[in-house]
Amino acid sequence: MLSFKSFIDEDYKTTALKFVASGIDKGQVDDYIKKFKELSNKQKLAGEEKNIDFWAKKTFSEFEEFVDTKEKEVAVVANKKVEKKDQGTSFNITTPEQRSAGWNIIIPLDKKASVYYGNLDCMSDWCVAKRKYDYFNQYFYEYNSNLIFCLNDKKKKEKWAIEIQSNEKTIIFYDINDKQISELEFEKQTELEFADIFRSYKPYIDKIKTLKFNKINLAKLEELKTKFPDATLETWHRHPNGGGWVENTAKVSDTAYVGPYAIVSGKAEVYGNPRVSGNSLVSGSSQVFGFAEIYGLAEVSGNAEVSGSAGVAGRSQVFGKAKVFGYTIVLDDAQVFGYAQVFGYARVSGNSKVSGNSKVSGNARVSGNALVSGNTEVSGNTRVTGNEILEKYNAII
């Protein structure tokens, strides 16, 4: 006598033979029969649809579509279960008194925690609790706001959120429907004292700042590695005044400003009150000091010096042992290198080059594709432009 299992196996074989006979590849048929069996064994099928003989009366395309749809549904449910179990990272700042009253007061530190607690027991309308959006990271990192969730086990369908902005003076309260309410209304609805919550929150402020700083550092480090592949958090640091990257071998005073996208590397020295901003780079053994400004995509390298109130901007480069000082400015795609000096109120721009032992001073202007080299001196109100080449030995213009 055939067992019940044998009857079922025969039904599978009969259905498979029917699909193959209709012109479907045997391997494809066997694959979908196997998937159907797995869904059936996991009890993911119900009603007539769980019987293989029901599908023997259908076309293979209908059977294939059903199996694919069911697999996707099972995967979605499985993912949601995993997400629900994943509580993310958070700080619990509930006091014993608050806990005894059924409260669970949480500071979420990542999107997973925000989604988990924002939907625990009942769903809130908070944008930071939406699984498919990334509002939490926007609030937490871009707006530099910290969130506190107030959940009550005894009030299953009620929860509140508090947003504390970076200045710690702007504090916003939200009910479960994402409606802003006053502090007075919050205390009335919850019977909690905000002062008590804030007192519990304060010891975690520095920890949260450190977490944000490290997370942002890791993201920024990946950008830095595109230019310096060997860069690590052990060999580089962020400058306290501006947040730009500084290699540990370089020296940058706290009074200097290094913008968030600027870089100081090698054995460069930046001291006094200069500003290094934009996507500029100061490298090699160069020095930038006084009230000088390096900005745009400008580069100062080698043993060059930029000081006084001089500016280096655009895509310009100052390198070699060149010196740029006074109130001068080098901009566009201009280059100053060799032992050249540019000072006074001079201006070097365009694609021009100043090199050798040349000097450009006073109110002189060097622009276009001009080349000033050798021991040439350009001073006063002289204009060197176009494709002019000044490279005479000891020439004074």
Image: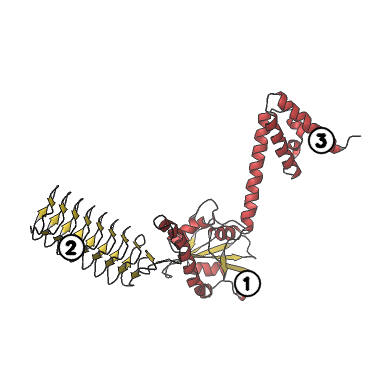
Q: Can you see residue 226?
A: yes
Q: Which residue is mark 2?
A: 341
Mark 2 or 1, nearer chain start: 1
Marks 1 and 3 close (CB-CB < 8 Å): no
Q: Quadrant of the N terminus?
A: top right
Quick one: which residue is furthest to the top in this view? Answer: 22
Identified by mark 3, the residue type is Ile
Q: Amino acid at mark 1?
A: Arg
Quarter of the image where one finds residue 289? bottom left
Up the image or down, 327 lies above or below 63; here it is: below
Please say whether residue 56 is visible from this viewpoint: no
Image x and y of residue 123, in percent: 59, 56
Place of residue 352 in the rendered image (x, y in percent of width and height, measured from the top left)? 19, 52
Mark 2–mark 1 Cα distance, whole angstroms, equals 71 Å
Question: Looking at the rendering, in which quadrant would you find the C terminus?
Answer: bottom left
Q: Position of residue 260 (x, y in %)?
A: 36, 62
Q: Which mark's residue is nearer the viewer, 3 or 2? A: 2
Name the residue beneath numbered marker 1. Answer: 99
Q: CA distance from mark 1 to mark 3?
A: 56 Å
Image quarter for residue 71? top right
Residue 8 marker: 3
Residue at x-position 84% and y-position 38%: 5
Crowd band around label 3 with a 10 angstrom C-alpha radius: few (<14), some (14–19), many (20+): some
Q: Amino acid at mark 2?
A: Gln
Name which of mark 3 and mark 2 comes first in the sequence.
3
CA gap, disc 3 to disc 2? 93 Å
Residue at image point 65% right, 38% down: 68
Number of marks: 3
Q: Residue at x 25, y 61 (%)?
A: 320
